[in-house]
Amino acid sequence: MATAAFELSDIRFRYRGGDFELRVPELRLEAGERVAVIGPSGAGKTTLLHLVAGIALPDRGKVTTAGTEITALGDAARRAFRARHVGLVFQEFELLEYLSVLDNILLPYRINPALRLDTPARARARALANGVGLGEKLGRPPARLSHGERQRAALCRALVTEPDLVLADEPTGNLDPDNKQRALDALFAYADRSGAALLTVTHDHDLLPHFQRVIDFKSFWSSGS
Amino acid sequence: MSGAAYLAWRYLLHHRIKTLILVLSIALIVFLPIGLRVLVRQSAAQLTARAEATPLVLGARGSALELVLASLYFDAEPPPSIAYAEATRVDESSLAEAIPLHLGFRTRDKPIVGTTLEYFELRGLHVAAGRMLAVLGECVVGARAAAELGVGPGDALVSSPETVFQLAGVYPLKMRVAGVLAPSHTPDDGAVFVDLKTAWIIAGLGHGHRDLADAKAQTDVAAREGGRITAKASVVEYNEITPENAASFHFHGEQAELPISAILARPRDAKARALLLGRYQAPDEPIQVLRPTAVMDELLETVVTVESYAVAAVGAVGVATLATAGLVFLLSIRLRRREIETLVKIGGSRASVATVLLSEVVGVTLLGIVLAGVLTLVTSRFGEAAIRRFLLS
């Protein structure tokens, strides 16, 4: 059996003080697979991304991402693992206003000592930016970018470490159709080129035909005690 | 540069106004007490140096501080006059050499100091241009005064009237500048020196006019009784002393009774000094003798006390400012919660994020300290000159 991009088994997760518990008996994403996650707001889609990335830890169960059981790792090791193997894209882009586009793309290298900011990393950042049409705007602050350009910069930041798994939380939620397409093209181009798996949370049903599989998430929550 | 330091630096650069305000606040908190201390020390050194170079000061009983400030720095109201005879008394005692000072008149805003040539010897003053005082009506000008008044040897200065509204007051005297003194970096640089007799002429105690015995001066004579000639009020007094009219200048009354402001006394030795100090201790003695160092020490004690209060006040303000800066920092962390969460999500450890935030604090603090250091260096480099310029001029 090939290595899964991630595998969740017998997951139980409850937010502190929360009434509902997320239960995922079994969920597996194959390497290179593109999967969309849909479901109503509050269904736990973002929580699923956090569990897969190791940002949140389940109360019970096992999360194995890119062949590593991240639920068994310590805090620092989990962060280093995430920085190396997982790329995260946020709906609100989350670029730092005080950094240039290039510095924002290279942010994972600045903030995590496990990653080395070397010449290849810089070259990768420039190549990614060129690929999404930001090559001429590397020195600009995010405030001087359009909405679509910001999301493309955020995509570059997620991909610059060459992750095995890209987790995108409504990456096109705030974009017009044109920019939506450009963002998806960039994501899919990277996935095709690198063989990375892609797990995308979305409310946009028009996007679903682009994915190989769709997970409807409404069934994963259950009422607490 | 490490990643955390780089991010902190970019943040500080991006928020330059906030950074600048914090840096300035920290710089001021650090600099004010240190700078104040440096200035006080330099002022003390300057004041003490002048006092140490002046063995004893004699003058009318009254405020010791005012007498010393007036005699050493020409900076206070002139003390009550004493008779010139007191200078003679000191000289004749053979205990000390007396150098009389006449103070109170000004030319424009510069003090006119009437004294003798011994004063220049005591202070180690020498002429850089022109020559020393030689004849009545001449002056030598301190280096800074000459520069500020724009005068040199051969030019003239006019003494200011005592008061503008006193119609019967003393006429201004036009004084010829005989020389300009070399800079001494003391209050002497800002003064204009004249011979004691010239000072008395400025004070109206001596004057020159046409010889009333001369037949051509009949219109100026009110009465003749034997050898005694009474001049009319209309007799014109010379307002400048020239080689032609110098002989006509004369003083009415005894020189011993003419006023001086103070006497700088240079005792022959330690014993003479003790004896001289002892001579003026009697309670009914109208003259006081002062050791300028003792008077300045008293003044400096007060200054140091004031400095301590000022430092305490600055310290209190500093604590308040630091507390405010801390609050600003904590509030900024709350405002940056999303940014911090993002850094953690993309793999930043809490330690890395804390290092970024700490680097910002360290960066601002270091910049503040560096700025305070620069200000302190500037103060210590130029403070002395500023003190000389503003405090001792």
Image: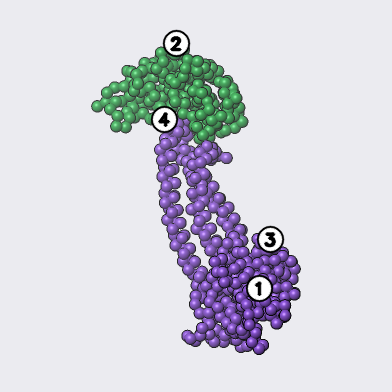
Chain colours: A green, B purple
Q: Which mark is residue A209?
A: 2
Name the residue rendered at 43%, 36% in the picture: B336
Mark 4 crowd level (few <14, some 14–19, many ≥20, 10 Å Cα) = some
Circle 3 SS class: loop
Chain letter for the residue marked with disc 4 in the picture: A
Mark 3 crowd level (few <14, some 14–19, many ≥20, 10 Å Cα) = few
Chain letter for the residue marked with disc 3 in the picture: B
Residue where numbered disc 1 is placed: B236
Q: Quadrant of residue B95?
A: bottom right
Residue where numbered disc 4 is placed: A55
Contact check, label 2 and label 3, Cβ < 8 Å: no
Give, as a three-letter code, the residue at label 3.
Gly
Chain letter for the residue marked with disc 2 in the picture: A
Give, as a three-letter code, the residue at label 4.
Ile
Farthest left residue in view: A225
- Note whether residue B266 is visible: no
Name the residue rendered at 59%, 55% in the picture: B378
Q: Which mark is residue B150?
A: 3
Q: Which mark is residue A66?
A: none
Give, as a three-letter code, the residue at label 2.
Pro
Contact check, label 4 and label 3, Cβ < 8 Å: no
Q: CA distance from mark 4 to mark 3?
A: 79 Å
Q: CA distance from mark 4 to mark 1?
A: 104 Å
Horizontal side, residue B30 vs residue B73: left or right: left
In the rendered structure, which disc, 4 or 2, sits on the residue that comes first in sequence?
A: 4
Closer to the camera: disc 4 or disc 1? Answer: 1
Labels 1, 2: one chain = no
